[in-house]
Image (spheres, helix red, strand yellow):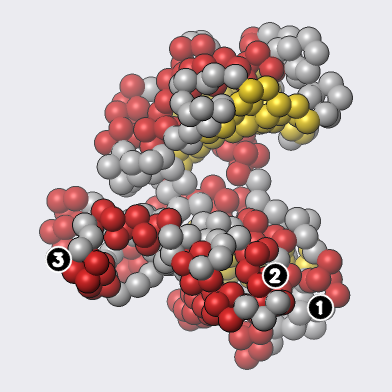
Amino acid sequence: MKILVINAGSTTLKYQLIDSDSEEVLAKGLCERIGIEGSRIVYNSSKTGEKKEKVFDIPDHGVALQAVIDVLVSPEDGAITSLDEIGAVGHRVVHGGEYFSSSVIVDDQVIKKIEECSDLAPLHNPANLLGIKACQKLMPTTPQCVTFDTAFHQTMPEKAYIYGIPYSYYENYKIRRYGFHGTSHSYVSKVAAKYADKPVEDSKVIVCHIGGGASITAVKGGKSIDTSMGLTPLEGMVMATRSGSIDPAIIQYIADKENKSVDEVLNILNKKSGLQGLSEKSGDMRDINAGVAEGDEKCKVAFNTFVYSAVKLIGSYVASMNGVDVIAFTAGVGENDNLARKAILESFGYLGIKIDDQINDKTHGSEAVISTPDSKVKVVVIPTNEELAIARETLDLIK
């Protein structure tokens, strides 16, 4: 069966067409700048593999999806001859609140619940819904399924997800830790568990999904028991432009000192902080590493703070699980930055972790064990594949 995976953002729409039997990616691409001047679709020709780009007006997600379909069935570049070849569509939705602990088939009630969660993810859920509704309109008889970023973390115990604020805020507004990157953490933890030399139900895995957004999750017995992102993706470790966890009083302090609103301060914490704010140069770790090599002191501060924030989280999850069998790195920095990986792992010699520097240095975007054979904890790099995970979940739902 061919499954179309859609990941709709506020101004983007990513897609992959996956053969569920072979798990081969038959087609993939991206519509970007939707509703903005200079919109375009970028894709790889399924016939030649050549990367192509078409610049044209894409005012909304319906037009974007039609552009995707036109490419998919194109005689010149397409992977299929008719939409009838698509057996199902799998969608990524960021926030499912407490409503969803697994993937579901879309119906009116599911759409209603996603809408109700939109105030928890105002930049993402409405865009995700636009993608779903566009697919429903263009493919009305094709099953639509959704996989939630928050679903994997619904197994967290109350002591991990509850905040130390009046309980009524949880009862009335569902203010709690939800966690994100769940699809990635689920996929990577399953792969990582194979390296644990014990049954999944007995394994203890820490997944470090470190990219522009970064989150770390403790996975015990195949289930998420704690994760670093919270009610929103702002909590946790220092990220590209997000501050990560801070003293909440800082918000009021900055607002008072600079005569800013809460919204303005939160915008700073989300978009102008993290690596970018500390280095005053860039939120891209490649630029930070280059700055460190050149002796830039603020880049050194940014790098060291980023690393230390990861170290503290990993250490806390070792404690919460009373040990760890496998530490897995994934996403942009986790998969490609050997310097950041090494710096993070240097703090865990007490666990008996030993890194093979030669393998670590040459591992970029490929699956590899970067610890030595005598390391007491295995450390692996595992490229995340959220689209494949969504395709698998979709197939399981419609079987």
From the viewer's perspective, is 147 left or right of 330? left
The residue at which mark 1 appears reads as: 357
Q: Is residue 43 above or below residue 245?
A: above
From the viewer's perspective, is 21 left or right of 395? right
User: 8 and 53: which one is in front?
Assistant: 53
Q: Secondary structure at mark 2?
A: helix
Q: Which mark is residue 166?
A: 3
The residue at which mark 2 appears reads as: 290
Residue 172, given in percent of the width and then of the height, sits at: 15, 51
The quarter of the picture where residue 102 lies is top left
Q: Is residue 353 above or below residue 126?
A: below
- Please tell me which residue is depicted at 23% across the width and 60% down the height of the picture: 260
Q: Give amino acid for label 2.
A: Ala
Q: Bin the neighbour count of mark 1 within 10 Å (Cα to Cα): few under 14, some 14-19, many 20 and up.
A: some
Q: How many marks?
A: 3
Q: Give amino acid for label 3.
A: Pro
- Please tell me which residue is depicted at 75% across the width and 27% down the height of the picture: 52
Instruction: Give the foreground label among 2 and 1.
Output: 2
Q: Bin the neighbour count of mark 3 within 10 Å (Cα to Cα): few under 14, some 14-19, many 20 and up.
A: few
Q: Quadrant of the C terminus?
A: top right
Is residue 217 shown to the viewer in this render?
Answer: no
Q: Give amino acid for label 1.
A: Asp
Residue 43, given in percent of the width and then of the height, sits at: 71, 28
Q: Is residue 258 above or below residue 349?
A: above
- Ranked by sequence position, the earlier of labels 2 and 1 is 2
Residue 11, given in percent of the width and then of the height, sits at: 48, 33
C-alpha distance separating marks 2 and 3: 46 Å
From the viewer's perspective, is 287 left or right of 357? left
C-alpha distance separating marks 2 and 1: 20 Å
- Ranked by sequence position, the earlier of labels 2 and 3 is 3
- Ranked by sequence position, the earlier of labels 1 and 3 is 3
